[in-house]
Amino acid sequence: MPIRLQTPLPGPRSRELMALRERFVARGPFHATPVFAARAQGALIEDVDGNTLIDFASGIGVVNAGHAPPSVVKAASEQAGRILHAGFNVTPYEGYVRLAERLAAVVPCAGPRKTLLVNSGAEAVENAVKIARAATGRPRVVCFEHGFHGRTYMAMTLTAKEKPYKEGFGPFCAEVTRVPFPYCYRWPGTSDPERVAQECFAAMTAAIAPEKTAAVIIEPVLGEGGFVPAPAAFLKKLRAYCSEHGIVLVADEIQSGFGRTGTLFACEQLDVEPDLMTLAKGLAGGLPLAAVVGRAELMDAPVVGGIGGTYGGNPVACAAALAVLDLFQDGSLLKRARVIGEILTVALEAWKQRFPRIGDARGLGPMRALELVRDRASKEPDKEAASGLARWCWEHGLVVLTAGTFGNVIRLLVPLCITDEDLAEGLAVMAAGLAQR
Ligand SMILES: Cc1ncc(COP(=O)(O)O)c(C=O)c1O
């Protein structure tokens, strides 16, 4: 049995550290569990009290290739022994350009591609907006309801949910227009993807002044918004509209990228070629690294010295990212991701038949979620059921995360190297928790 609990959770050492955290760490950062991690491997986390938990969160979709894959650890350690920091804007180094070369080969954007490396997802989003504005000379950015793009000022402005992400932090950035997201389950009057795509596209175009618009930024599968895939038909219309009006289409694949949906990027399955992509999380297997990748002529719009930063593309993070890409290269991890996606789809659909609390079971590949409701007819969100289930899970040794604008979604971000045994035990914990709701 992979889950081994020696103490009730949180254990005494976790409690001690939490007291220290409360004394010395700002209250703002949130924890999905009160359990302090000591080490992790594959899909298992060992806490500071010697308990072993199964991880269905992957550090919020970061350790897609599993915790501490030996080849990634080796590449990062060897690089750390050679040079920890050089500053790409002081003395450039090979890892940065090799990673840019590798990313250019795998992103689904048209034509020649270039890359900018930065440190976090939010920073990638900020830079995508700067690049789009520099390339078009236009001010406006269009974003979507239920979207999440990070916590810096532009990224936070582009983020939809007010509480907690924007509470008390205004005023926000100017020149941002928010339009509806094609959220089939909650679309009024229909949940047919084709009709939702059509109606949503009409609502979007009515709200936009295309000649003033530099960029449209969209998560092809909403992450924090609750794992809602945009219908391919919507993305197709959006692509055509952006091309027609010279608008830069930015796909934020920070959460959906690097195998999370069963292909390296969700855009591949949804059959859309964005102009720019923002990438982070899974990119470097746990080290802080993010990227804007896209069409070379757009990426070259900012003047020399206009984008970059002290730490962006740190050599150790680049070495880790190159090793992560090696892990994806032969296709076996993606194949496993698709198998996990099938196992999760079957399990979640079966639960939907059994548990009336589940209003919707959805996702793309292994990026799967359950939306919990008080009543299937009214679809009233049941946030308490979601937080109660997440709590029940960690108390029983399984880490899962909630999501969604209404906080009523349980999302599964399983490390894609998880064994069948660990996956089955984690699902059994969830099923037992659902039976209690
Ligand atoms: C889609 C998406 N964009 C941007 C971000 C922000 O990334 P970071 O937390 O690295 O700034 C996130 C983080 O959850 C995300 O899911």
Image (spheres, rainbow, N blue to C red):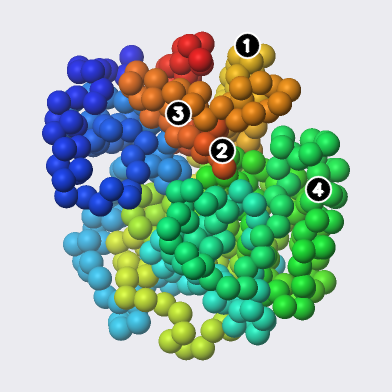
Q: Earlier in the sequence, mark 3 or mark 2?
A: 3
Instruction: Give the vertical position of 201 relative to 276 (above or below).
Output: above
Q: Which element is circle 2 on?
A: loop
Q: Tell whether circle 2 marks a residue whose Cβ is less than 8 angstroms from ligand 1.
A: no
Is the C-beta separation of discs 1 and 2 under 8 Å? no
**Of tags 1 and 3, which is closer to the observer?**
3
The quadrant of the image that shows the N terminus is top left
Identity of the residue drawn at 67% across and 81% down: 138
Which kind of residue does numbered mark 1 sit on? Arg
Q: Secondary structure at mark 3?
A: helix
Residue marked by disc 1: 354
Q: Give left or right: position of 359 versus 26.
A: right
Task: Say which label, 1 or 2, has the lower sequence index.
Answer: 1
Q: Classify 10 Å Cα crowding around label 2: few (below 14), some (14-19), many (20 and above).
A: some
Position of residue 151 relative to residue 420, above or below, is below
Using the image as rendered, state which of residue 5 and residue 328 is in the foreground.
Answer: 5
Q: Residue at x 63, y 11 (%)?
A: 354
User: Looking at the rendered structure, which numbered label has been put on residue 197?
Assistant: 4
Q: Nearer the viewer, mark 2 or mark 4?
A: 2
Q: Which residue is mark 3?
A: 387
- Closer to us: mark 1 or mark 2? 2
**Which quadrant of the view contains residue 179?**
bottom right
Earlier sequence position, callout 4 versus callout 1 = 4
Kind of residue indicated by mark 3 = Ser
Res 406 label: 2
What is the spatial separation of the Cα atoms under label 2 and label 4, in whole angstroms? 22 Å
Q: Earlier in the sequence, mark 1 or mark 3?
A: 1
* Type of the residue with mark 2: Phe
Which residue is rendered at x = 56% and y = 61% of the image?
A: 158
Give residue 363's mark. none
Give the amino acid type for the residue marked by disc 4 in the picture: Ala
In the rendered image, which quarter is residue 247 located in? bottom right
